Amino acid sequence: MTRRSLALAVLVALLTAGLANAPARADTSGLELIQTRQSLLGTHLWYAQTYRGLPVIDGYLAKHVEGEGEDTITVDGRRPIVGKVATRAEVAAGAAMAIARSRTGGVAGQAILSVLAGNAARLVWSVISESDADEVRTLVDALTGRVLRVESLIEDVDGTGQVFHPNPVVALKDQSLTDRHDVNYGKLRPAYREVVLTHLDGSGFLRGDFAFVGELRHSPEAFSAGNAFVYTRTDDRFEQVMAYFDVTEAQSYIQSLGFTDVNNEPQDLLPNEYKGDNSFYRPNQDTITLGVGGVDDAEDADVTWHEYGHAIHDDQVPG
């Protein structure tokens, strides 16, 4: 295998991780070319699976062709369709949209007649509903009107960041460390830790399911189209990353214990927005403000967790 072929194979493996146990090829299904892309590695063709002219839910096939076609890698994501499936709906599209709306509470868009593959393949209406916080697909049986599946289409995004965890004094077990006005001096550098920033919303800002860094007056908001937020403490965006990471990790841990509705929201965070030596939670605004007097408070996870505790208490017992 050439080096280019190896690179292509690695790329496809990364893009299709988890398909080792993909369903067997569906011989009764057709294919419709929906996208062709050129890259440095070759040509990439994406097909949608169809059944008697109808789209098959989540069925696809991808071909990745190197150069002039000497090497082709095929990723077969077609879904098995067992038995004969009806192609005419008994339930009208409008009725399916009303059913989806009543189930999700969102604004239902277009209903698309589709096939849900499997050992008991069915004719369904695929209805996409939108709300302020989600985009949901509802699959309604096109013969009976029964809701077969409701699923969110929003995917969380992971990013990378650099933080202290929980702070340099604890991490390095050195109480002689001082702030030195945000200087990134040598003794502090072993305390940096690269982490995965989970639950990002994909906007490129530090905003996600459990934390929201925004509406800052004194610092530019961290932004990265590739969700890479690696800064040092000389940059105010470093404290933004720490605040996002610490709150997201805290909420993720709470949920791992089975408590799924304890301040389960994007907590508004205002790092470096108070010039005094203090941090605080404002219940009327539901915000956590982290000060910069002395040591920047957002550089110490213990301070952020303390203020997040107040937000949790207020969420559980308002007022």
Image (cartoon, rainbow, N blue to C red):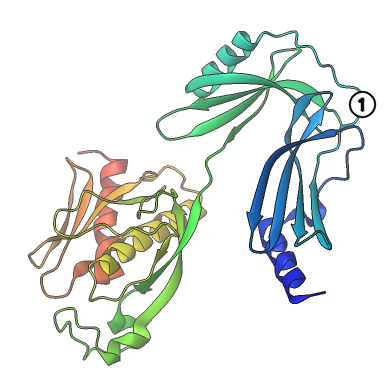
Residue visible at 37% across and 87% down in the picture? 190
Evaluate whether residue 302 shows in this view.
no
Q: Position of residue 234 (x, y in %)?
A: 22, 76
Q: Of helix, strand and loop, which one carries label 1?
A: loop
Residue position for label 1: 83
How many residues crowd around disc 1 within 10 Å: few (fewer than 14), some, or many (20 or more)? few
Residue visible at 52% across and 41% down in the picture? 154
Front-most of residues 175 and 28: 28
Residue visible at 62% across and 19% down in the picture? 111
**Which residue lies most toward the left here?**
276
Front-most of residues 222 and 317: 222
Count of all numbered marks drawn on residues in the image: 1
Give the answer, above or below, for where 239 lies relative to 150: below
Q: Quadrant of residue 299?
A: bottom left
Q: Amino acid at mark 1?
A: Gly
Q: Quadrant of residue 103?
A: top right
Evaluate whether residue 6 shows in this view.
yes
Give the answer, above or below, for where 65 lies relative to 150: below
Residue visible at 68% across and 46% down in the picture? 36
Q: Position of residue 241 (x, y in %)?
A: 33, 64
